[in-house]
Image: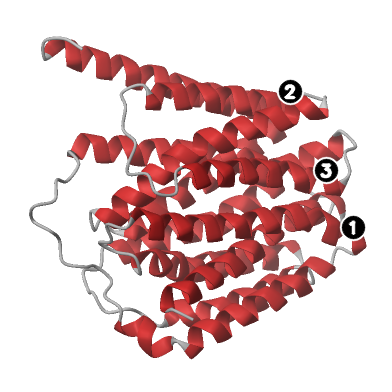
Amino acid sequence: MSIFTAINIASFLMACAGYILSISLALFLAQVKESGPLIVGLAGFAGNLAYTVVTFLLARRSIRKRNPVFIYATAGIGVLYMLMFFSPIPVIFLLLLITGALYAFFWPSMQESFSGSVDELKIGIFNLFWSAGVICGAFSAGFLYVISPLVPSLIILLLALPAFFLLISRKKELLLMKIYAEVDVNREVPMPGIIKEVRLLNFLHFFAVSTVLYLYPKLGLERHFSPQFIGSIAGILLISRFITFSLLIDKTILLHRAIFGVSCTLFFIGCSLAGLATNQYAIIAGVVILGVAGAFSYHNSLLMHIKYNLKAEIHESLIGAGLFTGALTAGFLGQVFNLPVAFVTIGGGIFLAGLWHSRMFLSGRQRDGGL
């Protein structure tokens, strides 16, 4: 087994464990703990806040040696995730903070293994592995939860431990890999404005997606949908993203002046359908739109950071920031108003961001002498 195959398999297992946790914990808090939207939103906020802060701090470090914490983090995450289902709510929040910090070592280290690579296919395969993991986790979470609210905790541990043993068996090779490859001075680097645009759009992608991942379980229960259907909603979003990734597997960065505005419009439509629709097919259409549109922004961001040796921690910290701010905003709006209003408000805010960006872009082009 090559070192990259080991990295891909470990990424699949940990992504699967993470999404089983996200869906089943939201169901657990809403149904067993009888928590309101704010508490459910705060659960999504806690882990992603820690993830964002730690990845940002790691990005500020200039050392190139790999930290072995990412290997041991897999086992730690599995054990702590399992403990959440046996803990009171304050302890659950504490454990979410710790696991968020541990994941901050794991995911950037996985991505940095491909640092400086010009092989879009290799990066695309990595994308498919972790994306397949989140699909399996989301689809299985509802079915596992129906058996017993405690079954997901055992499955999470059974996924995390093989990932740990797989990585620990390749520890020497993993630690010898360079975090950042030498930059090819002849390779064209994107303009700073393009880098900011790609990063901002990916942040908005996860801001929108967080409403489905963390708050739809609560909304679905209010509408008397089964846990299996609720888990499938997140899974359908993720499988639509996976299919789009497979179409982009060997494609380079896709840049076009219309991508930002069109993506924000699609995020608005997807959020609105997910939040307002009561027909199952309309809800599915909404999350498919979110998944397809989000795949383009994630593809551009990951590929840009890997190919041009930009720090993977920044890419990951923006993902975490999108997830925790989206979950917190949706939870707050859901508590003050209701969850459908929260979904539409978040989508509307993203749509306005797209209009603002398009206006700024066009006015800048006009000042420069045309389109």
Residue at point 28%, 59% (across, down): 311
Residue matched to label 1 = 146
Q: Do the residues under discs 1 and 3 have CB atoms within 8 angstroms?
A: no
Query: Which residue position holds label 2?
Result: 276
Q: Secondary structure at mark 1?
A: helix
Name above or below for residue 76 compared with residue 49: below
Say whether marks 2 and 1 touch (CB < 8 Å): no
Q: CA distance from mark 1 to mark 3?
A: 11 Å
Where is residue 294? Give x, y as percent: 50, 38
Could you classify mark 2 by the number of other residues whose Cα lies within 10 Å: few (under 14), some (14-19), or many (20 or more)? Answer: some
Residue 362 placement (x, y as % from top left)? 26, 14
Asked whether the residues under the numbered discs 2 and 3 touch, taking CB atoms below 8 Å apart as contact, a structural biologist would say no
Q: Earlier in the sequence, mark 1 or mark 3?
A: 1
Figure quadrant of residue 347: top right
Q: CA distance from mark 2 to mark 3?
A: 16 Å
Mark yes or no: residue 94 visible. Answer: no
What is the quadrant of residue 52 in the picture?
bottom left
The residue shown at (81%, 49%) is 30
Looking at the picture, tell me which residue is in the foreground, 306 or 43: 306
Under circle 2, the secondary element is: helix
User: In 3D space, how far apart are the residues under numbered discs 2 and 1 (Cα atoms)?
Assistant: 26 Å
Q: Could you tell whether 206 is left or right of 154 in the image?
A: left
Q: For the residue marked with disc 3, what is the amino acid?
A: Phe
Q: Residue at x 26, y 19 (%)?
A: 361
Q: Which residue is mark 3?
A: 229
Q: Pinpoint residue 283: horizontal percent, then vertical percent.
A: 74, 29
Q: Amino acid at mark 2?
A: Leu
Q: Is residue 252 visible?
A: yes
Does residue 16 appear left or right of residue 166 in this picture? right
**Left or right of residue 64, residue 267 in this image:** right
